[in-house]
Image (cartoon, helix red, strand yellow):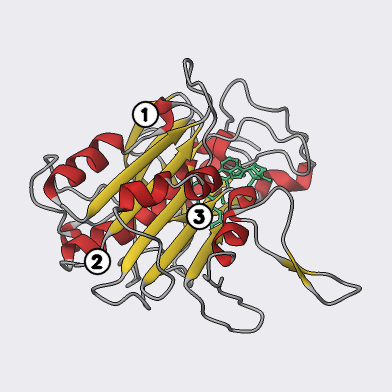
Amino acid sequence: MSPEEIAQIRQSRYNATVASLTLLHSDLMVLRIKPDFQRHDHHPGQYCTLGLGYWEPRADGCQEETLKPEDLTKIVRRSYSISCSIYENQLGGPLRDLKKDDWLEFYIVLVRENSEGRVPALTPRLFKLKDGDRLQLGERIVGHYTTSDVKPGDDVVFLGTGTGEAPHNYMIWDLLSRGHTGQILHACCVRYNRDLGYLPTHQALMKQFPNYHYLPLATREPGQTSKVYIQDAIEGGLLEDRLGRKLDPAKTHVYLCGNPKMIGVPVKDKETGERKYPEPTGVIEVLERRGFHADNAATKFKGNIHFEEYW
Ligand SMILES: Cc1cc2nc3c(=O)[nH]c(=O)nc-3n(C[C@H](O)[C@H](O)[C@H](O)COP(=O)(O)OP(=O)(O)OC[C@H]3O[C@@H](n4cnc5c(N)ncnc54)[C@H](O)[C@@H]3O)c2cc1C
Protein backbone atom coordinates (compact mmCIF):
# COMPACT_ATOMS: atom_id res chain seq x y z
CA MET A 1 0.00 0.00 0.00
CA SER A 2 1.11 3.55 -0.69
CA PRO A 3 1.67 5.96 2.24
CA GLU A 4 -1.51 7.83 1.11
CA GLU A 5 -3.60 4.65 1.21
CA ILE A 6 -2.23 3.80 4.66
CA ALA A 7 -3.02 7.30 5.93
CA GLN A 8 -6.57 7.01 4.61
CA ILE A 9 -7.26 3.57 6.06
CA ARG A 10 -5.80 4.63 9.42
CA GLN A 11 -8.10 7.63 9.44
CA SER A 12 -11.20 5.61 8.69
CA ARG A 13 -10.48 2.63 11.00
CA TYR A 14 -8.66 4.04 14.03
CA ASN A 15 -10.69 5.61 16.84
CA ALA A 16 -8.29 6.12 19.74
CA THR A 17 -4.94 7.70 20.65
CA VAL A 18 -2.03 6.60 22.83
CA ALA A 19 -2.30 8.94 25.83
CA SER A 20 0.87 7.50 27.37
CA LEU A 21 3.11 4.49 26.95
CA THR A 22 5.38 3.49 29.83
CA LEU A 23 7.92 0.85 28.91
CA LEU A 24 8.74 -1.05 32.12
CA HIS A 25 11.37 -2.99 30.19
CA SER A 26 11.81 -3.90 26.52
CA ASP A 27 8.94 -6.47 26.62
CA LEU A 28 6.47 -5.04 29.15
CA MET A 29 4.41 -1.89 29.12
CA VAL A 30 1.59 0.10 30.68
CA LEU A 31 -0.42 1.68 27.89
CA ARG A 32 -3.09 4.34 28.34
CA ILE A 33 -5.52 4.77 25.45
CA LYS A 34 -7.86 7.71 24.99
CA PRO A 35 -10.89 6.90 22.82
CA ASP A 36 -12.41 9.44 20.41
CA PHE A 37 -15.79 8.40 21.84
CA GLN A 38 -17.24 8.62 25.35
CA ARG A 39 -15.81 5.76 27.45
CA HIS A 40 -18.50 3.15 28.06
CA ASP A 41 -19.57 2.22 31.58
CA HIS A 42 -17.99 -1.01 32.71
CA HIS A 43 -17.04 -3.09 35.74
CA PRO A 44 -13.54 -3.67 37.12
CA GLY A 45 -12.27 -6.99 35.71
CA GLN A 46 -13.78 -6.59 32.26
CA TYR A 47 -11.94 -6.35 28.94
CA CYS A 48 -12.14 -4.84 25.48
CA THR A 49 -10.12 -5.12 22.29
CA LEU A 50 -7.17 -3.24 20.87
CA GLY A 51 -6.38 -3.38 17.17
CA LEU A 52 -3.75 -2.32 14.65
CA GLY A 53 -3.50 -2.81 10.91
CA TYR A 54 -1.31 -5.58 9.51
CA TRP A 55 0.37 -2.80 7.54
CA GLU A 56 1.90 -1.40 10.75
CA PRO A 57 5.57 -2.16 11.53
CA ARG A 58 6.63 -4.95 13.92
CA ALA A 59 9.16 -4.72 16.75
CA ASP A 60 12.61 -6.15 16.02
CA GLY A 61 13.53 -9.59 17.28
CA CYS A 62 10.04 -11.09 16.88
CA GLN A 63 9.04 -14.20 14.97
CA GLU A 64 8.85 -13.78 11.21
CA GLU A 65 5.31 -13.33 9.89
CA THR A 66 4.11 -14.34 6.41
CA LEU A 67 1.16 -12.31 5.15
CA LYS A 68 -1.06 -12.75 2.11
CA PRO A 69 -1.62 -9.57 0.04
CA GLU A 70 -5.29 -9.45 1.15
CA ASP A 71 -4.22 -9.40 4.85
CA LEU A 72 -2.49 -6.06 4.41
CA THR A 73 -5.68 -4.04 4.63
CA LYS A 74 -7.03 -5.96 7.67
CA ILE A 75 -6.87 -5.10 11.34
CA VAL A 76 -5.64 -7.58 13.95
CA ARG A 77 -7.61 -7.34 17.19
CA ARG A 78 -6.95 -8.97 20.56
CA SER A 79 -8.65 -8.80 23.95
CA TYR A 80 -7.10 -6.88 26.84
CA SER A 81 -8.25 -6.64 30.44
CA ILE A 82 -8.49 -3.10 31.73
CA SER A 83 -5.84 -2.45 34.37
CA CYS A 84 -5.49 0.32 36.96
CA SER A 85 -2.55 2.13 38.54
CA ILE A 86 -4.60 2.30 41.78
CA TYR A 87 -2.95 5.46 43.20
CA GLU A 88 -3.78 8.96 41.98
CA ASN A 89 -0.24 10.37 41.71
CA GLN A 90 1.81 9.43 44.70
CA LEU A 91 2.28 5.94 46.12
CA GLY A 92 0.69 5.84 49.57
CA GLY A 93 -1.46 8.90 48.76
CA PRO A 94 -5.13 8.97 47.73
CA LEU A 95 -6.46 6.21 45.49
CA ARG A 96 -7.35 7.19 41.92
CA ASP A 97 -10.57 8.99 41.08
CA LEU A 98 -11.22 7.10 37.84
CA LYS A 99 -14.10 9.38 36.87
CA LYS A 100 -11.48 12.01 36.02
CA ASP A 101 -9.59 9.76 33.60
CA ASP A 102 -10.53 9.98 29.92
CA TRP A 103 -8.34 6.98 29.02
CA LEU A 104 -8.24 3.26 29.75
CA GLU A 105 -5.14 1.56 31.12
CA PHE A 106 -3.70 -1.71 29.79
CA TYR A 107 -0.79 -3.86 30.99
CA ILE A 108 0.75 -5.74 28.08
CA VAL A 109 3.62 -8.17 27.53
CA LEU A 110 5.35 -8.55 24.17
CA VAL A 111 4.88 -12.08 22.86
CA ARG A 112 7.94 -12.46 20.63
CA GLU A 113 7.26 -15.93 19.33
CA ASN A 114 4.92 -18.85 19.63
CA SER A 115 6.09 -22.36 18.80
CA GLU A 116 2.58 -23.78 18.34
CA GLY A 117 -0.21 -22.21 16.32
CA ARG A 118 -0.41 -18.63 15.15
CA VAL A 119 2.50 -16.21 14.92
CA PRO A 120 1.99 -13.34 17.40
CA ALA A 121 0.48 -10.53 15.33
CA LEU A 122 -0.60 -7.71 17.60
CA THR A 123 1.92 -7.33 20.42
CA PRO A 124 4.93 -6.95 18.05
CA ARG A 125 3.01 -4.00 16.56
CA LEU A 126 1.78 -2.53 19.89
CA PHE A 127 5.39 -2.37 21.06
CA LYS A 128 6.25 -0.03 18.14
CA LEU A 129 3.67 2.55 19.30
CA LYS A 130 4.62 5.90 20.84
CA ASP A 131 2.69 8.68 22.58
CA GLY A 132 0.15 10.28 20.24
CA ASP A 133 -0.05 7.32 17.82
CA ARG A 134 -3.45 6.10 16.68
CA LEU A 135 -5.02 2.63 16.94
CA GLN A 136 -8.37 0.89 17.21
CA LEU A 137 -10.13 0.44 20.56
CA GLY A 138 -13.17 -1.84 20.70
CA GLU A 139 -16.18 0.12 21.92
CA ARG A 140 -17.68 -2.80 23.87
CA ILE A 141 -16.28 -3.53 27.32
CA VAL A 142 -17.38 -7.01 28.31
CA GLY A 143 -16.75 -10.03 30.54
CA HIS A 144 -18.06 -11.96 33.54
CA TYR A 145 -14.78 -11.79 35.47
CA THR A 146 -15.93 -9.26 38.07
CA THR A 147 -16.40 -9.02 41.84
CA SER A 148 -20.21 -8.81 41.55
CA ASP A 149 -20.72 -11.74 44.01
CA VAL A 150 -18.23 -10.57 46.63
CA LYS A 151 -19.76 -9.44 49.93
CA PRO A 152 -18.00 -6.74 52.01
CA GLY A 153 -16.61 -9.14 54.66
CA ASP A 154 -15.53 -11.92 52.27
CA ASP A 155 -11.87 -12.80 51.79
CA VAL A 156 -10.78 -12.27 48.21
CA VAL A 157 -7.77 -14.04 46.71
CA PHE A 158 -6.37 -12.87 43.37
CA LEU A 159 -3.92 -15.25 41.68
CA GLY A 160 -2.35 -14.25 38.38
CA THR A 161 0.54 -14.96 36.05
CA GLY A 162 2.38 -12.06 34.38
CA THR A 163 0.05 -9.47 32.89
CA GLY A 164 -2.83 -11.58 34.26
CA GLU A 165 -2.67 -9.19 37.21
CA ALA A 166 -4.22 -6.43 35.03
CA PRO A 167 -7.88 -7.06 35.95
CA HIS A 168 -6.87 -7.78 39.55
CA ASN A 169 -5.34 -4.30 39.87
CA TYR A 170 -8.63 -2.78 38.82
CA MET A 171 -10.70 -5.01 41.13
CA ILE A 172 -8.32 -4.29 44.04
CA TRP A 173 -8.67 -0.54 43.42
CA ASP A 174 -12.45 -1.02 43.51
CA LEU A 175 -12.52 -3.11 46.70
CA LEU A 176 -10.12 -0.82 48.59
CA SER A 177 -11.95 2.31 47.39
CA ARG A 178 -15.21 0.82 48.69
CA GLY A 179 -13.67 0.07 52.12
CA HIS A 180 -13.74 -3.72 51.76
CA THR A 181 -13.39 -5.24 55.24
CA GLY A 182 -12.41 -8.85 54.37
CA GLN A 183 -8.81 -9.84 53.70
CA ILE A 184 -7.44 -9.31 50.19
CA LEU A 185 -4.55 -11.49 49.08
CA HIS A 186 -2.91 -10.88 45.71
CA ALA A 187 -0.27 -13.27 44.35
CA CYS A 188 1.43 -12.84 41.00
CA CYS A 189 3.78 -15.36 39.42
CA VAL A 190 6.34 -14.11 36.88
CA ARG A 191 9.67 -15.29 35.49
CA TYR A 192 11.87 -12.45 36.73
CA ASN A 193 11.39 -9.72 39.35
CA ARG A 194 11.55 -7.11 36.55
CA ASP A 195 8.24 -8.55 35.28
CA LEU A 196 6.44 -7.29 38.40
CA GLY A 197 5.36 -4.06 36.74
CA TYR A 198 3.20 -2.73 39.58
CA LEU A 199 5.42 -3.93 42.48
CA PRO A 200 5.96 -0.49 44.13
CA THR A 201 2.19 0.10 44.04
CA HIS A 202 1.47 -3.19 45.81
CA GLN A 203 4.19 -2.57 48.38
CA ALA A 204 2.69 0.84 49.15
CA LEU A 205 -0.81 -0.64 49.39
CA MET A 206 0.40 -3.22 51.93
CA LYS A 207 1.71 -0.41 54.15
CA GLN A 208 -1.51 1.57 53.84
CA PHE A 209 -4.15 -1.17 54.10
CA PRO A 210 -3.75 -3.76 56.88
CA ASN A 211 -6.14 -6.15 55.07
CA TYR A 212 -4.12 -6.09 51.80
CA HIS A 213 -1.36 -8.66 51.23
CA TYR A 214 0.83 -9.03 48.12
CA LEU A 215 2.82 -12.16 47.34
CA PRO A 216 5.17 -11.89 44.32
CA LEU A 217 6.65 -15.15 42.99
CA ALA A 218 9.53 -15.10 40.46
CA THR A 219 10.37 -18.53 39.04
CA ARG A 220 13.54 -17.78 37.05
CA GLU A 221 15.24 -15.03 39.04
CA PRO A 222 18.97 -15.80 39.41
CA GLY A 223 19.76 -17.03 42.90
CA GLN A 224 16.31 -18.54 43.31
CA THR A 225 16.87 -21.90 44.98
CA SER A 226 13.46 -23.39 44.18
CA LYS A 227 10.68 -22.59 41.74
CA VAL A 228 7.47 -21.78 43.57
CA TYR A 229 4.40 -21.69 41.36
CA ILE A 230 1.00 -20.60 42.62
CA GLN A 231 -0.11 -24.23 43.01
CA ASP A 232 2.94 -24.84 45.28
CA ALA A 233 2.23 -21.70 47.30
CA ILE A 234 -1.24 -23.03 48.09
CA GLU A 235 -0.22 -26.61 48.80
CA GLY A 236 2.87 -25.61 50.80
CA GLY A 237 0.90 -23.21 53.00
CA LEU A 238 2.70 -20.00 51.88
CA LEU A 239 -0.54 -18.45 50.65
CA GLU A 240 -2.38 -19.06 53.90
CA ASP A 241 0.63 -17.72 55.85
CA ARG A 242 0.34 -14.44 53.92
CA LEU A 243 -3.44 -14.37 54.24
CA GLY A 244 -3.07 -14.93 57.99
CA ARG A 245 -5.82 -17.55 58.05
CA LYS A 246 -7.06 -20.74 56.40
CA LEU A 247 -8.60 -20.56 52.93
CA ASP A 248 -12.25 -20.94 53.88
CA PRO A 249 -14.57 -21.84 50.97
CA ALA A 250 -17.56 -20.51 52.92
CA LYS A 251 -16.33 -16.92 52.82
CA THR A 252 -13.64 -16.69 50.14
CA HIS A 253 -13.74 -15.84 46.44
CA VAL A 254 -10.70 -16.82 44.36
CA TYR A 255 -9.85 -15.13 41.04
CA LEU A 256 -7.47 -16.79 38.57
CA CYS A 257 -6.15 -14.97 35.52
CA GLY A 258 -3.49 -15.51 32.88
CA ASN A 259 -1.75 -18.73 31.84
CA PRO A 260 -4.28 -21.57 31.30
CA LYS A 261 -1.82 -24.06 32.83
CA MET A 262 -1.90 -22.21 36.15
CA ILE A 263 -5.71 -22.13 36.06
CA GLY A 264 -6.25 -25.75 34.94
CA VAL A 265 -9.88 -25.67 33.80
CA PRO A 266 -11.36 -29.20 33.93
CA VAL A 267 -12.89 -30.56 30.72
CA LYS A 268 -15.63 -33.11 30.15
CA ASP A 269 -14.25 -36.44 28.95
CA LYS A 270 -15.90 -37.15 25.57
CA GLU A 271 -16.32 -40.87 26.26
CA THR A 272 -17.22 -41.06 29.94
CA GLY A 273 -18.78 -37.61 30.31
CA GLU A 274 -16.71 -37.25 33.48
CA ARG A 275 -15.16 -33.93 34.48
CA LYS A 276 -11.38 -34.32 34.15
CA TYR A 277 -8.62 -32.08 35.45
CA PRO A 278 -5.78 -31.31 33.02
CA GLU A 279 -2.10 -32.19 33.50
CA PRO A 280 -0.06 -30.59 35.03
CA THR A 281 -2.20 -29.86 38.08
CA GLY A 282 -3.73 -26.39 38.01
CA VAL A 283 -5.09 -24.22 40.81
CA ILE A 284 -8.71 -25.26 40.21
CA GLU A 285 -7.87 -28.87 41.05
CA VAL A 286 -5.88 -27.86 44.15
CA LEU A 287 -8.72 -25.67 45.44
CA GLU A 288 -11.59 -28.02 44.56
CA ARG A 289 -9.86 -30.65 46.68
CA ARG A 290 -10.26 -28.13 49.52
CA GLY A 291 -13.97 -27.58 49.02
CA PHE A 292 -13.99 -24.72 46.50
CA HIS A 293 -16.00 -24.88 43.26
CA ALA A 294 -15.14 -23.29 39.92
CA ASP A 295 -17.63 -21.33 37.83
CA ASN A 296 -18.96 -23.22 34.83
CA ALA A 297 -20.15 -21.04 31.96
CA ALA A 298 -21.69 -24.03 30.10
CA THR A 299 -24.01 -24.96 32.98
CA LYS A 300 -24.25 -21.37 34.30
CA PHE A 301 -22.97 -22.66 37.67
CA LYS A 302 -21.58 -19.85 39.82
CA GLY A 303 -18.93 -21.02 42.23
CA ASN A 304 -16.31 -19.32 44.36
CA ILE A 305 -13.45 -19.82 41.87
CA HIS A 306 -13.65 -17.38 38.97
CA PHE A 307 -11.18 -17.42 36.08
CA GLU A 308 -10.06 -15.67 32.91
CA GLU A 309 -7.76 -17.56 30.53
CA TYR A 310 -5.53 -15.39 28.33
CA TRP A 311 -5.08 -18.06 25.65
C1 LIG B 1 -10.11 -11.90 27.96
C2 LIG B 1 -8.64 -11.71 27.65
C3 LIG B 1 -7.93 -10.68 28.23
C4 LIG B 1 -6.57 -10.52 27.98
N1 LIG B 1 -5.89 -9.51 28.60
C5 LIG B 1 -4.55 -9.37 28.41
C6 LIG B 1 -3.81 -8.37 29.13
O1 LIG B 1 -4.37 -7.59 29.92
N2 LIG B 1 -2.48 -8.28 28.89
C7 LIG B 1 -1.82 -9.13 28.02
O2 LIG B 1 -0.58 -8.99 27.86
N3 LIG B 1 -2.49 -10.09 27.34
C8 LIG B 1 -3.83 -10.21 27.50
N4 LIG B 1 -4.54 -11.16 26.78
C9 LIG B 1 -3.86 -11.88 25.69
C10 LIG B 1 -4.01 -11.04 24.40
O3 LIG B 1 -5.35 -11.08 23.94
C11 LIG B 1 -3.12 -11.52 23.26
O4 LIG B 1 -3.34 -12.89 23.03
C12 LIG B 1 -1.63 -11.29 23.57
O5 LIG B 1 -1.38 -9.93 23.80
C13 LIG B 1 -0.75 -11.76 22.40
O6 LIG B 1 -1.21 -11.16 21.21
P1 LIG B 1 -0.47 -11.47 19.84
O7 LIG B 1 -1.39 -11.11 18.72
O8 LIG B 1 0.88 -10.84 19.84
O9 LIG B 1 -0.29 -13.04 19.88
P2 LIG B 1 -1.48 -14.13 19.81
O10 LIG B 1 -1.59 -14.64 18.44
O11 LIG B 1 -2.72 -13.59 20.46
O12 LIG B 1 -0.94 -15.23 20.80
C14 LIG B 1 0.04 -16.15 20.39
C15 LIG B 1 0.41 -17.00 21.59
O13 LIG B 1 1.09 -16.23 22.57
C16 LIG B 1 0.88 -16.73 23.88
N5 LIG B 1 0.36 -15.63 24.75
C17 LIG B 1 -0.77 -14.90 24.57
N6 LIG B 1 -0.90 -13.97 25.54
C18 LIG B 1 0.15 -14.12 26.35
C19 LIG B 1 0.55 -13.46 27.53
N7 LIG B 1 -0.15 -12.43 28.07
N8 LIG B 1 1.69 -13.88 28.13
C20 LIG B 1 2.43 -14.88 27.59
N9 LIG B 1 2.10 -15.56 26.47
C21 LIG B 1 0.96 -15.19 25.86
C22 LIG B 1 -0.08 -17.89 23.71
O14 LIG B 1 0.66 -19.10 23.64
C23 LIG B 1 -0.74 -17.61 22.38
O15 LIG B 1 -1.23 -18.76 21.78
C24 LIG B 1 -5.91 -11.38 27.06
C25 LIG B 1 -6.63 -12.41 26.44
C26 LIG B 1 -7.97 -12.58 26.73
C27 LIG B 1 -8.71 -13.72 26.06
Pointer 2: what residue?
182
Q: Earlier in the sequence, mark 3 or mark 1?
A: 1
Q: Residues within 10 Å of mark 3 (few under 14, many from 20)?
A: many
Q: Is residue 20 above or below residue 152?
A: above
Closer to us: mark 3 or mark 1?
3
Residue displayed at 55% across by 39% down: 123
Q: Which residue is mark 1?
A: 24
Residue type beneath disc 2:
Gly
Report which quarter residue 272 is drawn in. Answer: bottom right
Whether ligand 1 has any atom under 8 Å from the Cβ at mark 1 is answered as: no
Q: Is residue 146 left or right of residue 262?
A: left
How far from the left and from the top, in percent, is residue 14? Answer: 47, 53
Mark 1 neighbour density, 10 Å: few (under 14) some (14–19) many (20 or more)? some
Q: Residue at x 47, y 26 (%)?
A: 192
* Residue at the image position 64 percent from the left and 26 percent from the top: 62
Do the residues under discs 3 and 1 have CB atoms within 8 angstroms?
no
Secondary structure under the numbered disc 2 in the rendered image = loop
Ligand 1 within 8 angstroms of badge 2 C-beta:
no
Q: Residues within 10 Å of mark 2 (few under 14, many from 20)?
A: some
Identify the secondary structure beneath mark 3.
strand
Q: Position of residue 145 (x, y in %)?
A: 46, 68
Q: CA distance from mark 1 to mark 2?
A: 32 Å
The answer to whether 309 appears left or right of 200 in the picture is right
Nearest to viewer (mark 1 / mark 2)? 2
Q: Residue 196 occupies which quadrant of the picture?
A: top left
The amino acid on which the numbered mark 3 sits, given as a three-letter code, is Cys
Tell me if residue 238 can be seen.
yes
- x and y, in percent, of residue 301 in the image: 57, 82
Q: Is residue 258 above or below residue 27?
A: below
- Say what secondary structure mark 1 lies in: strand
Residue for badge 3:
257
Quarter of the image with the N terminus in it: top right
